[in-house]
Image: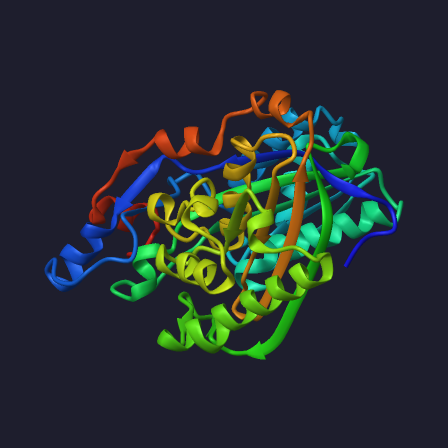
Amino acid sequence: MKPSREVGIVGYGAYVPRYRLPASEVSRVWTGGHGGVPVDEKSVPGLDEDTATIAIEAARNALLRSEVDPGDLRSVWVGSESHPYAVKPTGTIVAEAIGATPAVSVADWQFACKAGTEALQAAFALVGSSMADYAMAIGADTAQGRPGDALEYTAAAGGAAFVVGAREQSLAYLEASYSYVTDTPDFFRRPYRHYPEHGGRFTGEPAYFKHITAAVQALLEELGYKPTDFAAAVFHQPNVKFPQRVAQILGFNKDQLKAGLLAGQVGNTYAAAAMLGLTAALDVAKPGDRILMASFGSGAGSDAFSFVVTDVACERQARAPSTQAYIARRAPVDYALYTRYRRKLQMQ
């Protein structure tokens, strides 16, 4: 898919909470320290942090890099699967906090872990149709896993925001995108249930690998590119192994993954995972670099994008904290403190 008006990323921003739960802590409590762990550690939101506050911080960093007046934004769209309210939009909180109200479209997006790229896809369409000069799309989550479940090792917190504008103002312009979706119930949460359920091995095939490979292969075919045409590639990161394996299937190498592979450092940030990896890749990108991003959302679907970095990228990288700076700003917590911060003890 290509918009009729050429568009790109004008500004981007990230935010990762400082607290970290080592995966060894989860293993110590639930398996006595036996067996392997899927990541090294994961980010944990503090008591005063949620999807809205994380989205606000990422949005402010994106605005710093873009130098766009927030009043000129015509959309503030927030993708997440952990919105703080069941009935009340996260987007209005974010839009008000960054000064984008009242002449703005606001919406909360849902599609599991690809809710953020779904909002980004729509932002490109809004600007690409000339209905707006600037639009903002955000992916943010404070995901939870059932105590002792495999998801508890990886369900993390973080956010990424993008200001979309015309190509001539962009630090990375969009070449094309492709979405691939089927009804594959690999992961879900029923109403009134606190924790989601997942299909275990079923989440790999036919969910994650089928959808990402199909979306990326179709995009490459549409553009006439090979994996070697890309300087960097970012795939959804539920753990460390999945993005590495899908990269190998598609023909990408480890060096292309290096900048955007964050799963081992922050865990699975769900709706922010692929977008957060893209911010890390943009932090170190050079003019002319081509970057691939492919998200995955359970349920299931994948959005694949091809970007080309422009000459203004290097100057804008320094306007806000880098993604790695947030990752380095870490404070380890034990399982007890994590339980308190995530309110896993329900008292009457």
**48 to 4, vertically: above or below:** above
Name the spot of residue 197 as percent of width and height, x first: 40, 72
Nearer to us in this view, 36 or 29: 36
- What is the quadrant of the N terminus in the image? bottom right
Number of dots carrying numbers? 0
Res. 73 visible in picture: no
Nearer to us in this view, 30 or 201: 201
**291 to 61, vertically: above or below:** below
Name the spot of residue 180 as percent of width and height, x first: 64, 69
- Check the image and tell me how it is coloured: rainbow
Name the spot of residue 120 as percent of width and height, x first: 68, 50
Nearer to us in this view, 17 or 346: 17
The residue positioned 42% from the left and 43% from the top of the image is 258
The residue positioned 63% from the left and 49% from the top of the image is 78
Rendering quarter of residue 117: bottom right
Rendering quarter of residue 301: bottom right
Q: Is residue 117 left or right of residue 332?
A: right
Nearer to us in this view, 296 or 80: 296
The residue positioned 12% from the left and 62% from the top of the image is 34
Name the spot of residue 7 as percent of width and height, x first: 78, 42
The residue positioned 59% from the left and 69% from the top of the image is 214
Res. 342 visible in picture: yes
Q: Is residue 154 left or right of residue 67?
A: left
Q: Is residue 203 left or right of residue 301?
A: left
**286 to 333, vertically: above or below:** above
- What is the quadrant of the C terminus in the image? bottom left
